[in-house]
């Protein structure tokens, strides 16, 4: 589609579906309530401009701060906003930051501070990013049809993909802050000579983080689909079990056996 054609396309203000007539073919909203997307560029330049943007409230930094203050309100606002098209850039930034912090930057900093072997693993960054993206591609269609069956509101596949992308982004953002908090806490305890089991401490924080993510996903699905609380809880727990116990471990094992992460890491010289 040409740039002129893209500029003339309008999207449904309720679900984000491209309009072809007076009413949205997905949810039935009148075209008068729709708006055209703001023109945007693609690529790394647009990603950096979004991050450093000081105007509006949809730059990467602004969205991250909004997620930390009001996570559920933020994801519903962005999902229902047909002009917001930066969810993939936000996902790239948050997941990349999470993986790089956990597997590279923080281990290197810990090794430098305490003169212990460096356990940084750049291949783990690549492995987990591949697992995250492929896992989303597998799980999102399944989740969509289950939620559409159990929900009371009509939602388009495109709008649900946006919700899932932003949900994963929030999880990565929250996990990054928890990892930084753990690192600072561990450094403080060790510098003061406090005896502590860092493995147990990390597991405790990880469990609390997972609980927070489950609550967030439950509430966002409840509001997005118009579900009752019991249904939203059951759907969230089922999706989490399928993701964390089956799909992600299976993909991780498959990638490691195939040497995909090492090949990609070698390709980029990391």
Image: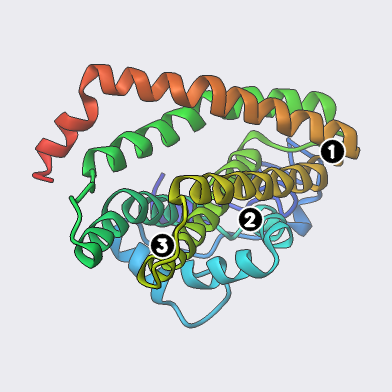
The Cα atoms of the two marked residues, 2 and 3, are separated by: 39 Å
Q: Which of these two is toward me, 212 or 152?
A: 212
Q: Is residue 6 above or below residue 39?
A: above
Q: State which mark lies toward you, 2 or 3.
A: 3
Residue placed at 51% from the left, 45% from the top?
A: 200
Find residue 186 and report its image quarter: bottom left
Residue placed at 35% from the left, 64% from the top?
A: 46
Quick one: SS at disc 3? helix
Residue 147's x, y, as percent?
75, 29
Residue placed at 45% from the left, 23% from the top?
A: 249
Mark 2 or 3 closer to N-term? 2
Asked if the residue at tag 3 contacts the one at tag 2, i.e. Cβ–Cβ closer than 8 Å, the answer is no
Q: Please name the residue that numbered disc 2 is placed on.
A: 82
Q: Residues within 10 Å of mark 3 (few under 14, many from 20)?
A: some
Residue placed at 62% from the left, 64% from the top?
A: 67
Q: Residues within 10 Å of mark 2 (few under 14, many from 20)?
A: many
Q: Please name the residue that numbered disc 3 is placed on.
A: 183
Q: Which of these two is toward me, 8 or 218?
A: 218
Residue 108's x, y, as percent?
23, 58
């Amino acid at each position: 589609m040409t740039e002129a054609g893209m500029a003339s396309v309008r999207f449904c203000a309720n679900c984000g579906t491209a309009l072809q007539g007076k009413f949205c073919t997905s949810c039935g909203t009148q075209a008068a309530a729709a708006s055209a997307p703001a023109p945007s560029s693609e690529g790394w330049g647009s990603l950096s401009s979004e991050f450093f943007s000081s105007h509006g409230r949809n730059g990467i930094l602004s969205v991250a701060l909004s997620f930390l203050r009001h996570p559920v309100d933020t994801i519903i606002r962005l999902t229902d906003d047909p002009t917001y098209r930066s969810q993939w850039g936000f996902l790239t930034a948050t997941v990349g930051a999470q993986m790089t912090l956990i597997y590279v930057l923080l281990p290197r900093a810990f090794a430098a501070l305490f003169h212990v072997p460096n356990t940084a693993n750049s291949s783990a960054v690549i492995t987990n990013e591949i697992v995250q993206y492929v896992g989303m591609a597998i799980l999102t269609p399944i989740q969509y049809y289950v939620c559409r069956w159990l929900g009371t509101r009509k939602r388009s596949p495109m709008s649900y993909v946006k919700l899932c992308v932003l949900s994963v982004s929030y999880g990565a953002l929250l996990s990054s802050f928890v990892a930084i908090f753990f690192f600072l806490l561990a450094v403080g305890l060790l510098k003061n000579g406090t005896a502590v089991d860092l493995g147990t401490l990390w597991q405790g924080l990880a469990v609390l983080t997972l609980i927070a993510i489950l609550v967030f996903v439950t509430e966002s699905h409840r509001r997005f689909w118009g579900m009752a609380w019991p249904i939203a809880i059951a759907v969230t727990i089922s999706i989490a079990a399928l993701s964390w116990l089956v799909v992600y471990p299976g993909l991780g094992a498959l990638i490691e056996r195939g040497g995909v992460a090492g090949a990609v890491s070698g390709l980029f010289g990391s």
